[in-house]
Image (cartoon, rainbow, N blue to C red):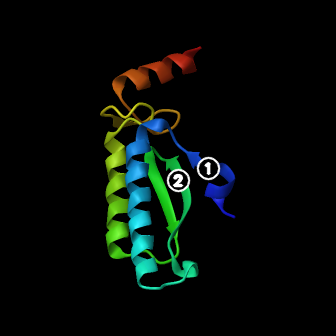
């Protein structure tokens, strides 16, 4: 039982494509390990998916290949240019909290905070 099991995905829907891509990469990695006869105790496991400091954090426990680690790093960096809420092009915004939002979602968030 870990954070993912308890809290689920802790970020906006705008990063769905990034998360989906990483989940598929994890599945491919596990399929390769199954083909090699490696037991499930030695498979990578998604432990946490969340937003932190405005970017995607996708934490994997267990053995992680260089290829999967590279894909994870690439997606986390890419999240800094994708709106967390709607998937439009976005940018990291400072404020009360750091978020990666497009102009529209940022304006809506600012309006909510003022009211």
Question: Disc 2 or 1, which lies upstream in sequence?
Answer: 1
Contact (CB < 8 A) between labels 2 and 1?
yes
Vertical arrangement, residue 68 with respect to residue 51, above or below: below
Vertical arrangement, residue 97 with respect to residue 5, above or below: above
> In the drawing, does residue 2 fall left or right of residue 23?
right
The residue drawn where x is 37% and y is 68% is: 69
| Mark 2 vs mark 1, CA separation in Å | 7 Å
Counting other residues with Cα less than 10 Å from the Cα at mark 2, is it few (<14), some (14-19), or many (20 or more)? some
The residue drawn where x is 40% and y is 58% is: 24
Residue, disc 1: 8
Residue, disc 2: 49
Counting other residues with Cα less than 10 Å from the Cα at mark 1, is it few (<14), some (14-19), or many (20 or more)? few
User: Quarter holding the N terminus?
Assistant: bottom right
The residue drawn where x is 66% and y is 50% is: 7
Residue 67 falls in which quadrant of the image? bottom left
Vertical arrangement, residue 3 with respect to residue 89, above or below: below
In the foreground, 94 or 78:
78
> In the drawing, does residue 28 fall left or right of residue 5?
left
Residue 14 falls in which quadrant of the image? top left
Vertical arrangement, residue 111 with respect to residue 101, above or below: above
The residue drawn where x is 61% and y is 49% is: 8
Tell me where residue 83 appears, x and y as whole percent: 38, 35
Number of dots carrying numbers: 2
Tell me where residue 80 appears, x and y as whole percent: 35, 44
User: Quarter holding the C terminus?
Assistant: top right
Q: Secondary structure at mark 1?
A: loop
């Amino acid at each position: 039982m870990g954070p993912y099991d308890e809290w689920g995905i802790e970020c906006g829907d705008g990063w769905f494509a990034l998360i989906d891509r990483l989940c598929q990469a994890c599945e491919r990695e596990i399929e390769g390990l199954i083909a090699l006869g490696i037991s499930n105790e030695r498979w990578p496991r998604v432990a946490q998916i969340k937003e932190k400091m405005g970017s995607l954090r996708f934490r994997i426990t267990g053995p992680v290949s260089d290829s999967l680690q590279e894909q994870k790093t690439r997606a986390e960096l890419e999240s800094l240019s994708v709106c967390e809420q709607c998937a439009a092009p976005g940018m990291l915004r400072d404020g009360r909290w750091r978020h990666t939002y497009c102009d529209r979602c940022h304006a809506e968030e600012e309006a909510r905070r003022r009211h």
